[in-house]
Amino acid sequence: MALRQARVTPELIPALVPPPWGALDGPPLQRLLAGTGPFALWMVLLLAIGMPHAAGIGRGKAYVTIGVCSVLFLLVTL
C-alpha cells in the first residue's frame, strides 16, 4: 500500500513551519520579527562577506548596500 500525501494549502504553511520569532498575524513589529530568522540573518551575513569580493567595491559600501536592501526587503514583505 502506497503512502498518501495530503495536500498542503497556503493556509496551512504557517502552522507547518512557524516563524522562529514574532507572529505572522500580529502587530507590525511582530510581523517584522517574523520576517527575520536565523536563515535570513545568515543570508545577510554571507552576502555582506561576499559582495565586496564579487563586486570589487569597498567593504563599507557593500555593508551599507546589503543593510539597506535587507531592511527594504523586510519592509516590503511586512
Image: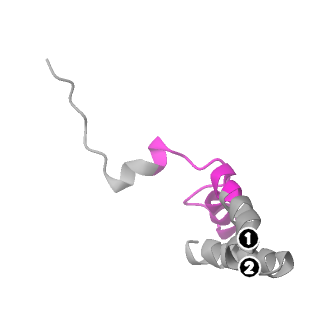
Looking at the picture, tell me which residue is in the foreground, 65 or 32.
Answer: 65
The part of the image, by quadrant, that contains residue 43 is bottom right
Above or below: residue 41 compared with residue 47: above
Contact between labelled residues 1 and 2, with CB atoms less than 8 Å apart: yes
35 part of magenta stretch: yes
In which quarter of the view is residue 6 placed?
A: top left
Q: Quadrant of the N terminus?
A: top left
Q: Which residues are magenta?
A: 14-42
Residue indicated by mark 1: 53
In the image, taking residue 16 as reference, residue 60 lies left or right, namely right
Instruction: Give percent across and percent down for residue 47.
Output: 69, 65
Element under disc 1: helix
Residue 56, quarter of picture:
bottom right
Residue 25 falls within the magenta-colored stretch:
yes
Q: Position of residue 62 (x, y in %)?
A: 77, 77
* Label 2 sits on residue: 56
